[in-house]
Amino acid sequence: MAWRLAAWWAIPFVLGPPLLSSDVYSYAAQGALVARGLNPYALGPAALSNGDVLNAVDPVWRNAPSPYGPLTGLIQHGAVALGGSPVGAVVALRIVAVLSVVVIGLCAATLATDRMRATAVALTVLNPLVLLQVVSAAHLEGAMCALLMLALVACRRSPALALVAACAATAIKAPAAAAILLISAQHWRMARSWTTRSPNWAYWLQPVAVVAACWLTFSLLVAHSWGWLSALTTPTRRVHPRIAHRAARRSTERVRELGAVPGHDCGSAGGWAGGGGVHRLLPRGDL
């Protein structure tokens, strides 16, 4: 019943435009950079020059390098290759988001008790935040959380598989790295090697070996993949006052360009200074 209700509830978010965020267009632009052989960790979507993808990206992020991991680059590149167009790439990323939510719900039901399975599904796939941020906005946090949920399920059987899933989640977005530390700590606690006179070094080194192998494998999947480590600070650099001023200036220039287009009367020079042109272009709630 919960799954059926979730399917009907998610239809408007699956078929409608992205809500609350336009990051999915940045994903598509970064995938286009990879498809053209450019380094998304050194260049922003502005390197695409002109086009529908660039026009859809938020001006604040057009010069921002990708702060995401190598698996994100692989997903973005695959979405562009399968979609064949900007709209097709967005649709492909939306499909990834829907599949991620399904995996999250299945894992939540697996981890819950029999009496709480319906509640676990309702709190995940029916969660308004999940529907808005993951399904509608197609944020790749959905894929990251799906891999983290798989890691929790795998913890019951194999800590090594759990570490692989956690490393894959980290290769999408860096905050998932906290799960690697927690799973390793749980593995070492179960080993109890510190209570013996001759520690079992195999148990201590297994998580380190698994993580190192995963990082090497994921980093070699795409070109320029090591660059994401130096691009992790991209979101913090975006709030610099100079960057905000530059973005505002570009937006103002765009509004002035619209004033020269028939049908977009931005007012005279005096009217513009008084805000007359702005009032004609922006909704009342934005003023």
Image: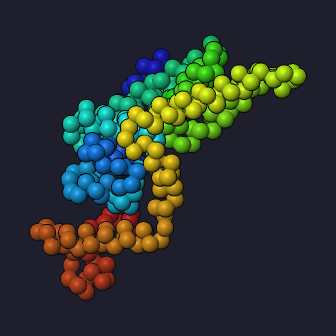
Given residues 13 and 112, the one toward you in this image is 112
Report the residue that reaches farthest toward the bottom: 270
Q: Which colour scheme is used?
A: rainbow
x and y percent of residue 2 in the render?
Answer: 49, 20
Name the residue rendered at 49%, 37% in the picture.
Answer: 171
Residue 259, located in which quarter of the rendered image?
bottom left
Residue 74, located in which quarter of the rendered image?
top left
Relative placement, left or right, of 100 versus 91 is: right
x and y percent of residue 141 in the render?
Answer: 48, 39
- Total count of labels: 0
Name the residue rendered at 67%, 35% in the picture.
Answer: 181
Q: Is residue 141 visible?
A: no
User: With respect to residue 131, does 112 lie above or below?
Assistant: above
Name the residue rendered at 38%, 65% in the picture.
Answer: 286
User: With respect to residue 46, does 226 lie above or below?
Assistant: above
Relative placement, left or right, of 186 versus 209 is: right
x and y percent of residue 142 in the render?
Answer: 47, 35
Given residues 37 and 263, the one toward you in this image is 37
Given residues 224 and 143, the one toward you in this image is 224
x and y percent of residue 150 in the render?
Answer: 54, 24
Relative placement, left or right, of 261 versus 48 is: left
Q: Is residue 87 visible?
A: yes
Quadrant where the C terminus lies?
Answer: bottom left
Report the residue that reaches farthest toward the left: 262
Name the residue rendered at 46%, 41% in the picture.
Answer: 69
